[in-house]
């Protein structure tokens, strides 16, 4: 999963760590209910809400939330949106994608789509307009997290320039000390953009 956070003072590193730990802890007790991405996300959102500790998790969680421009036109749809406070345009978002899927036609890592249909959209204002952090959540459908990480790493390295990454940059270890969470850094906008990538 990759995570991009917000420029607002609400979304401190401590706040983001709480979100990430909630996701990792909740995934341990979550049973994938479907092969379909949106259904998994909706069920997982409900599971996150149930597991949320309201004494320390001061945010709401919404699935399938639309982002709008100032005229009401739809810019994009956020799979999981974590909001705190009263500013609609300040949030912490996750785009959720399946990885390593066995289709009737054959196996596909889906790592390229994870990048082009997921990470790219943080740079065209579909997901996090004006924000400097955000995230990706990868549903590893065959359970092979080690290879899923390598698949995404290669897909990212093949598209560094489109992701505003430096020549030798790649997935980094996360401060969360979890093998399931990685980070990427992007030279984009007024602030460098941090991306956390989680594989579940």
Image (cartoon, rainbow, N blue to C red):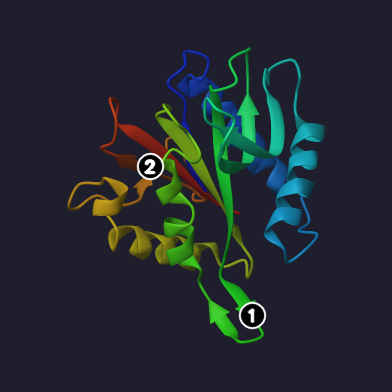
Q: Is residue 104 above or below residue 10?
A: below
The residue where tag 1 is placed is 103
- Residue at 38% x, 45% y is 173
Disc 2, SS: loop
Disc 1, SS: strand
Q: Is residue 118 above or below residue 68?
A: below
Residue 67 at x, y = what percent? 58, 34
Q: Residues within 10 Å of mark 2 (few under 14, many from 20)?
A: many
Q: Which of 173 and 184 lies nearest the eye of the viewer?
A: 184
Is 166 left, or right, of 147 in this rendering? left
Is 5 left, or right, of 60 in this rendering? left
The residue where tag 2 is placed is 123
Disc ID at residue 13: none
Q: Residues within 10 Å of mark 1 (few under 14, many from 20)?
A: few
Looking at the rendering, which quadrant does residue 139 occupy? bottom right
Whole-number angstrom distance, CA of label 1 to CA of label 2: 30 Å
For the C terminus, which image quadrant? Answer: bottom right
Front of the two marks 1 and 2: 2
User: Which badge, 1 or 2, comes first in the chain's sequence?
Assistant: 1
- Residue at 55% x, 30% y is 92
Say whether residue 28 is visible.
Answer: no
Q: Which of 14 and 101 lies nearest the eye of the viewer?
A: 101
Residue 136 at x, y = what percent? 52, 47
Residue 115 at x, y = what percent? 43, 57
């Amino acid at each position: 999963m990759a995570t991009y956070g917000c420029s607002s003072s609400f979304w401190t590193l401590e706040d983001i760590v709480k979100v990430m730990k909630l996701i990792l802890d909740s995934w341990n007790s979550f049973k994938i209910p479907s092969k379909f991405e949106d259904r998994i996300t909706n069920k997982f959102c409900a599971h996150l809400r149930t597991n949320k500790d309201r004494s320390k998790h001061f945010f709401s969680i919404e699935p399938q939330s639309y982002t709008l421009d100032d005229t009401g036109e739809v810019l994009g749809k956020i799979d999981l949106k974590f909001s705190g406070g009263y500013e609609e345009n300040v949030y912490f978002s996750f785009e959720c994608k399946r990885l390593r899927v066995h289709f009737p036609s054959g196996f596909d890592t889906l790592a390229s789509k994870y990048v082009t249909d997921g990470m790219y959209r943080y740079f065209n204002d579909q997901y996090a307009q004006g924000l400097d952090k955000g995230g990706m959540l990868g549903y590893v459908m065959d359970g092979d997290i080690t290879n899923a990480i390598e698949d995404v790493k290669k897909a990212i390295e093949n598209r560094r320039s489109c992701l505003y990454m430096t020549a030798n940059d790649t997935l980094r270890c996360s401060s969360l000390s979890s093998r399931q969470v990685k980070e990427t850094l992007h030279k984009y906008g007024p602030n460098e953009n941090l991306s956390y990538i989680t594989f579940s």
